[in-house]
Image (cartoon, rainbow, N blue to C red):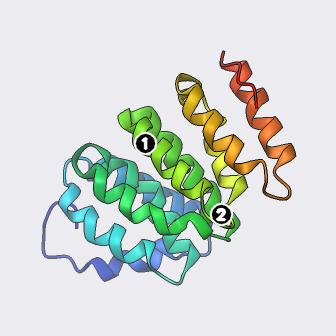
Amino acid sequence: YLLGKDVNPQVLRAPAGDVRPDVRAALGATLREAGEAAPEHLLPLMDHWLKAKSPRMRETALNFIPALAASHADEVIAHLHPLSAEDDRAVRAALVDTLQALAEGGMAESVLGLLTRWGDEPAPNIWVITRSLSYAWAAEYPQGVASILRALQSTPGSEKPIRQTLDALARHGAQIEI
């Protein structure tokens, strides 16, 4: 499929939605690795799989999305925006991993902007936002991170995740006062 041969992308739906996490992870990793050379083939998969009802397909898509960062950064961020209300645990974990990879791959400001928009929503996904901000990349943006965390403070249940994020950032050398 990624080589542009006449392969129906529907063939990839079965492993993308497989019940076994290792199958989904292997497909996502393969598409990510090989897809950097053919991002135009990954775009339609990202579009369809992130909108799929199956959380397994959304999780698989998140695994290969960093391959699109260099060539389609704006589209990637636009496609990730609706995932702010994601409730599937595995998809949320994959989302955090994807955001970390994007931020560490040169898209930190875009990721920070996305997290800022998510933090301003009426019911922000505190777990995804605070986990995403707990990595070393975020320590380079203390003002932006502080702004997001301040916005989250009024949300019920945010105290512990915010404290854990601040502790993680301190380990990365960023002392942020909230």
**Residue identifier under label 1:** 102
x, y percent for residue 29: 43, 52
x, y percent for residue 86: 61, 69
**Residue identifier under label 2:** 90
Label 1 environment density (alpha carbons within 10 Å; few <14, some 14–19, many ≥20):
many
x, y percent for residue 143: 57, 28
Residue 34 vs residue 129: left or right? Answer: left
**Element type at mark 1:** helix
- Residue 56 drawn above or below residue 134: below
**Element type at mark 2:** helix
Residue 1 vs residue 110: left or right? Answer: left
x, y percent for residue 81: 46, 63
Q: Residue at left 30%, top 49%?
A: 73
* Label located before the other in sequence (1 or 2): 2
Residue 150 occupies which quadrant of the picture?
A: top right
Instruction: Return the residue nearer the eye: 8 or 83.
Output: 83
Q: Residue at left 48%, top 51%?
A: 114
Q: Residue furthest left?
A: 5
Marks 1 and 2, Cα distance to the nearest angstrom? 18 Å
Instruction: Return the residue nearer the eye: 159 or 86.
Output: 159
Kind of residue at disc 2: Ala
Residue 37 vs residue 105: left or right? Answer: left
> Nearer the observer, disc 1 or disc 2?
1
Instruction: Return the residue nearer the eye: 172 or 11.
Output: 172
User: Mark number for residue 87?
Assistant: none
Kind of residue at disc 1: Leu
Residue 129 vs residue 62: left or right? Answer: right
Viewport quadrant of the C terminus: top right
